[in-house]
Amino acid sequence: MRKTLQRFSPLPLWEKLLNQAMVGVALLLAIELIFQLQKITIWLWYLLLLAICGIIYKRREFLQARTVILAVLPLVVLSLLSEIIELVNRSLYFTIKNYLAIGFAVAVTWMISMLFISNKQQKALLKEQERRHQEEEQARLMAARKVELEVLVAERTQELTQQKEELQQALVELKTTQNQLIQSEKMASLGELTAGIAHEIQNPLNFVNNFSEVSVELLDELKNDGLVRLPDDEKIKVEEIIEDLVQNLEKISHHGKRADAIVKGMLQHSRTSTGKKEPTDINALADEYLRLSYHGLRAKDKLFNAIMETKFDENLPKINVIPQDLGRVILNLFTNAFYSVNEKKKQNIAGYQPTVSVSTCYITLPIGEMGVEIRVKDNGLGIPQKVMDKIYQPFFSTKPTGQGTGLGLSISYEIITNAHGGEMTVETKEGEFAEFIIQIPQ
């Protein structure tokens, strides 16, 4: 039984009890040999053996050992029966003794055969258990390998997804750069065309402006000196005509000067800067033009008011730029920002505070070089998304007719990209804010 249990399902507690049972059997044998108490020890032996058989058939953990008990049970029963018959009726015992001997021979044969069969079955079961164990181990290894492969697939998928996102981002940046290059080329071509047109328009504009001023002076002289000889009734009529002519000439002069400003802006737009780059304190430059723009607008409109915020990087080194050109860009951005917040203030929005802010920062640019980032932000009207692609085009303006030439952002964009090798972008939300971002390499 102990060997059978060790083969299939080792049970340390029961193995200990069976060892104790073996010690008990040895003690009974010793008592029988020493004290000749065969009649007592044999009944103890039968009780012990029957107890073991009962336990084996009652406990499920001894399932594999039942074949052993089945093999020896006929011999145990026959032996116990013969002892009982001999004890109760000895004459009957001697009468059937020969039959009992035959029964013992059959029981022994049965025991040997069953033990042999049980041994073969146990070996077959052991092989089957080993085969199942191998299959389970193989299944476990396959499951572990499957988990490893799933992890590897997930990691590879994540890498591919990340590479895909990086490629998509690179594609977006490439398209943005391509659009900027196309825009730059358009501006360069337009600049050449603009220069020729501006020069051609400049001369007739000069004549219009000059002759309008001369005509006003002649009319003043006529009004002061030439009407003396006329009768009073004709003098009044002529004075009215002169007044109409003066008003017309003033309109001609006003619009002529406006056209002259547009032409000069076109010439500035097309003219290649000849300024030299020099180390410049960007913080001081931005602060100076912020104050200049604000007070310039205050001089034109006493009711104009706005909050100015600055956030300058104190560790910002001097950057090689063309101060006049960069100042012109910053001044244009400030002017547009103050205009936007002033227009929004006219809408009488409750709790609205016009605010224009400027900040600088020393950063690593996308091209890998160190440089400065300048941000000009306002909480004004913002820029409609439908016109975002047009804001850098010459002569395009969101301002009403007569309030802007549409060249400010176009010139600013060219100064930043061409003259300084930087980038100029904008972030905006219509009705809430607009923020222009300038990045210039050191």
Image (spheres, grey):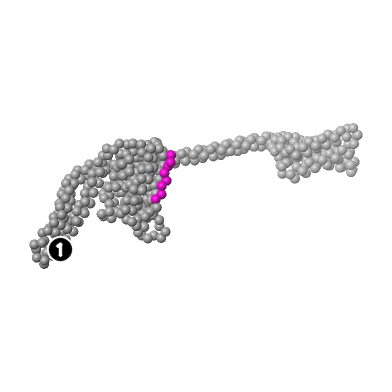
Tell me if residue 190 can be seen.
Answer: no
Q: Depth check: 316 or 1 in front? A: 316
Residue 324 horizontal/vertical position (percent): 31, 41
* Lateral position of residue 10 relative to residue 363, left or right: right
Residue of label 1 = 240
- Is 119 in the magenta? no
- The quarter holding residue 54 reads top right
Identity of the residue drawn at 80% across and 37% down = 20
The structure residue drawn at horizontal position 35% and vertical position 56%, both measured from the top left corner, is: 304
* Above or below for 406 versus 162: below
In the rendered view of the protein, which quadrant contains the N terminus? top right
Report crowding for label 1: few under 14, some 14 to 19, many 20 or more residues within 10 A (C-alpha). Answer: few
Looking at the image, which is closer to me, 241 or 112? 241
Q: Quadrant of the C terminus?
A: top left
Residue 180 percent across, percent down from the top left:
32, 42
Amino acid type assigned to the residue bearing label 1 in the image = Glu
Please tell me which residue is depicted at 39% across the width and 52% down the height of the picture.
307
Q: Say whether residue 350 is visible.
A: yes
Image side of residue 186 versus residue 377, left or right:
left
Q: Which residues are magenta?
A: 308-315
Residue drawn at x 86%, y 42% is 84
